[in-house]
């Protein structure tokens, strides 16, 4: 069959649709598949044109595994009933012509089909299987005509079955972050830098401020922390109260040293980020001061943490499981008065140029164990007492003093 994508009218439609990032397919006037967007290929799990059914009639195409396994039986039957009158009208030979493409399950149903002209626009919903659960998806279908009124084909756009005001909530998220999260949809072991952050002595602050003011503060700080993590190519983890977590994956940043550097740079930056946020709120008459909102930060290295998406009906997040995650939490809990504590494990992941960029001289550092820190409680000493850490601000001052100053800008 002639490849309709070479038809300039079809090519023009494809050029308009391709940049949108939508899940879209294009059929010709005979209901044969002409084109599928890259995003729809991703959802179907293949780019193989034979598996996708390029050039095949839509009735034949929908019987292929790549398509059939995506839709529940019940909604597939409903979608068939909604579309088959139009398909029969637009297929050469009508209902009899469809018999060429139908399997044994569909053949008996074709005798009940009453062909109907294809409308300018119509929509139907389907239950699509994602991660073992069914999710409603809408398909909007529209006839396409050229300037002379000749039928060029049919465009079908698949979109989430959510009202616009709920989709707007999703759209508020950062697209780059979502893409990073999509890259770790499949849980497996990954080398990762881990960051934990929490406000120092937030209990008295929460009691002093009105509930609305404290919520405004935490929302602003959380947003600022997330922005800093995203800027350094990290993945935002879950927020619990006034705490935050983040992951910097070696596979996404290019190397273990690059991931360690990104996490440490973020950790160094966060206290100032929070201070600037608090100053803006204070200028807006919130009764707070930067001294009230010091951020404690802990950074650690996980050589083989189990990392992946955690997706439920109530949330979508990336999480990590492993001893090092718990150890990082204890490192952060042992920091006091706005300290940034980094473990020996993460500092020693740095290549020389990355250490230099951070103003660190790893070979000159002297570490202390968690158990030796004045801020370590019984739980931290028990769970991570032997972990060696360094105060990152002090380590950077020491590194700047022991290296030639012209290297630092």
Image (cartoon, rainbow, N blue to C red):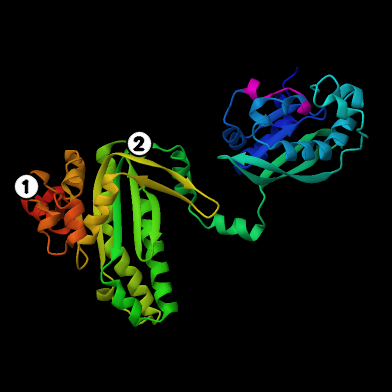
For residue 242, say whether it is visible.
yes
Q: Is the residue marked by circle 1 packed among few (<14), some (14-19), or many (20+) residues within 10 Å?
A: few
Q: How many marks?
A: 2
Q: Nearer the viewer, residue 22 or 305?
A: 305
For residue 342, say whether it is visible.
no
Write down the region rendered in magenta. Answer: 49-59
Give the residue displayed 23% in from the left and 61% down from the top: 333
Q: Residue 384 appears at what percent x and percent y?
A: 19, 51
Which residue is label 2 attached to?
189
| Quarter location, residue 286 | bottom left
Q: CA distance from mark 1 to mark 2?
A: 32 Å
Give the residue displayed 64% in from the left and 28% down from the top: 66
Which residue is label 1 attached to?
364
Q: Residue 109 appears at what percent x and percent y?
A: 87, 30
Give the residue displayed 32% in from the left and 36% down from the top: 254
Q: Between disc 1 and disc 2, whose residue precedes?
A: 2
| Quarter location, residue 323 | top left
| Quarter location, residue 68 | top right
Q: Is residue 54 left or right of residue 234?
A: right
């Amino acid at each position: 069959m002639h490849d309709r994508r070479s038809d300039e009218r079809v090519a023009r439609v494809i050029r308009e649709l391709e940049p949108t990032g939508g899940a879209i397919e294009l059929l010709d006037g005979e209901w044969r598949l002409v084109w599928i967007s890259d995003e729809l290929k991703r959802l179907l799990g293949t780019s193989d044109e034979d598996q996708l059914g390029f050039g095949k009639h839509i009735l034949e195409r929908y019987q292929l595994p790549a398509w059939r396994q995506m839709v529940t039986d019940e909604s597939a039957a409903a979608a068939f009933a909604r579309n088959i009158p139009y398909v029969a009208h637009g297929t050469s030979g009508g209902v009899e012509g469809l018999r060429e493409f139908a399997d044994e399950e569909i053949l008996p149903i074709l005798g009940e089909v009453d062909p109907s002209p294809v409308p300018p626009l119509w929509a139907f919903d389907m239950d699509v299987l994602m991660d073992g659960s069914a999710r409603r998806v809408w398909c909007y279908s529209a006839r396409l005509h050229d300037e002379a009124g000749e039928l060029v084909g049919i465009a079908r756009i698949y979109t989430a079955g959510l009202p616009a005001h709920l989709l707007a909530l999703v759209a508020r998220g950062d697209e780059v972050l979502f893409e990073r999260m999509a890259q770790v949809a499949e849980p497996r072991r990954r080398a990762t830098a881990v960051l934990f952050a929490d406000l120092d002595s937030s209990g008295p602050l929460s009691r002093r401020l009105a509930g609305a003011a404290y919520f405004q503060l935490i929302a602003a700080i959380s947003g600022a922390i997330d922005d800093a993590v995203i800027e350094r190519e990290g993945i935002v983890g879950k927020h619990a109260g006034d705490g935050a977590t983040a992951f910097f994956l070696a596979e996404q940043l290019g190397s273990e040293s690059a991931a360690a550097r990104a996490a440490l740079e973020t950790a160094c930056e966060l206290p100032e980020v929070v201070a600037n946020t608090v100053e803006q709120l204070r200028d807006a008459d919130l009764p707070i001061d930067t001294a009230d909102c010091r951020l404690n930060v802990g950074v650690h290295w996980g050589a083989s943490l189990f990392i992946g998406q955690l997706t439920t009906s109530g949330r979508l997040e990336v999480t990590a499981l492993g001893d090092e995650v718990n150890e990082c939490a204890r490192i952060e809990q042992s920091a006091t008065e706005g300290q940034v504590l980094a473990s020996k494990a993460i500092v020693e992941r740095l290549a020389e140029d990355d250490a230099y960029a951070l103003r660190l001289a790893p070979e000159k550092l002297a570490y202390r164990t968690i158990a030796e820190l004045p801020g370590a409680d019984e739980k931290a000493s028990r769970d991570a007492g032997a972990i060696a850490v360094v105060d990152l601000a002090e380590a950077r001052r020491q590194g700047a003093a022991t290296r030639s100053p012209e290297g630092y800008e």
